Image: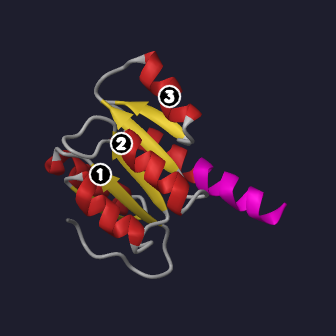
């Protein structure tokens, strides 16, 4: 895990079974002003999601035991408005379509530029804010 979540910032939960990659993403987001934490499995992510300790979820699609689609389903039941961005090393159009159909805000194919993720997160929070004011 990276540093603990701080109050007053959007808290981004990064889930990737390659924890080193997840931590690199979290550190990059922190350098861009986000508060981010990385975990290496879906079980730990579920615990944090149940405690509602994050404002957005960025998850790998394919992971052992609990994958990104399972996390997405759980989030849609628990916190339907939580932005979810799915990332994967496998660029399959069918997987991307399924993620979006199940409520993912965006889908990124690895490797991606950190600016792409940053922009997706900004758009996700703007869209959520627009929905809450209407």
Q: Tell me which label, 2 or 3, sits earlier in the chain.
A: 2
Residue 107 coordinates in the image, percent (x, y): 47, 34
Q: Position of residue 74 (x, y in %)?
A: 44, 53
Residue under the point 33% across and 61% down: 46
**Mark 1 vs mark 3: which is more N-terminal?**
1
Give left or right: position of 64 versus 54.
Answer: left
Q: Which of 17 and 109 is in front in this view?
A: 17
Report the residue marked by disc 2: 68
| Quadrant position of residue 54 | bottom left
Q: Is residue 13 left or right of residue 121?
A: left
Q: Nearer the viewer, mark 1 or mark 3?
A: 3
Point out the stretch of residues depicted in magenta: 123-134
Q: Which of 102 and 132 is in front in this view?
A: 102
Q: Circle 3 sits on which residue?
A: 98
Q: Are marks 1 and 3 in contact (CB under 8 Å)?
A: no
Residue wearing tag 1: 15
The residues tagged by marks 2 and 3 sit, at their Cα atoms, a distance apart of 11 Å
Q: How far apart are marks 1 and 2 (CA)?
A: 8 Å
| Residue at horizontal 67 percent and vertical 57 percent from the top | 128
Horizontal and vertical percent position of residue 4: 28, 76
Residue at point 41% right, 61% down? 12
Q: Is residue 21 magenta?
A: no
Up-down: is 23 above or below 8?
A: above
Residue at 19% over, 45% down: 17
Disc 1 and disc 2 in contact, CB within 8 angstroms: yes
Disc 1 versus disc 2: nearer the observer: 2
Q: Quadrant of the C terminus?
A: bottom right
């Amino acid at each position: 895990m990276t540093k603990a979540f701080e109050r007053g910032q959007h808290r981004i939960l990064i889930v990737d079974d390659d924890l080193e990659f997840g931590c690199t993403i979290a550190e990059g987001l922190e350098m861009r002003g986000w508060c981010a934490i990385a975990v290496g499995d879906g079980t730990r992510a579920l615990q944090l999601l149940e405690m509602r300790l994050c404002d957005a979820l960025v998850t790998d699609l394919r992971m052992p035991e609990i994958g990104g689609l399972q996390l997405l389903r759980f989030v849609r039941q628990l916190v339907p408005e939580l932005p979810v961005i799915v990332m994967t090393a496998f660029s399959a159009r069918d997987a991307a379509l399924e993620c979006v159909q199940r409520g993912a805000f965006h889908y990124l194919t690895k490797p991606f530029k950190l600016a792409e993720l940053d922009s997706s997160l900004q758009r996700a929070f703007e869209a959520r804010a627009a929905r809450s004011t209407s």
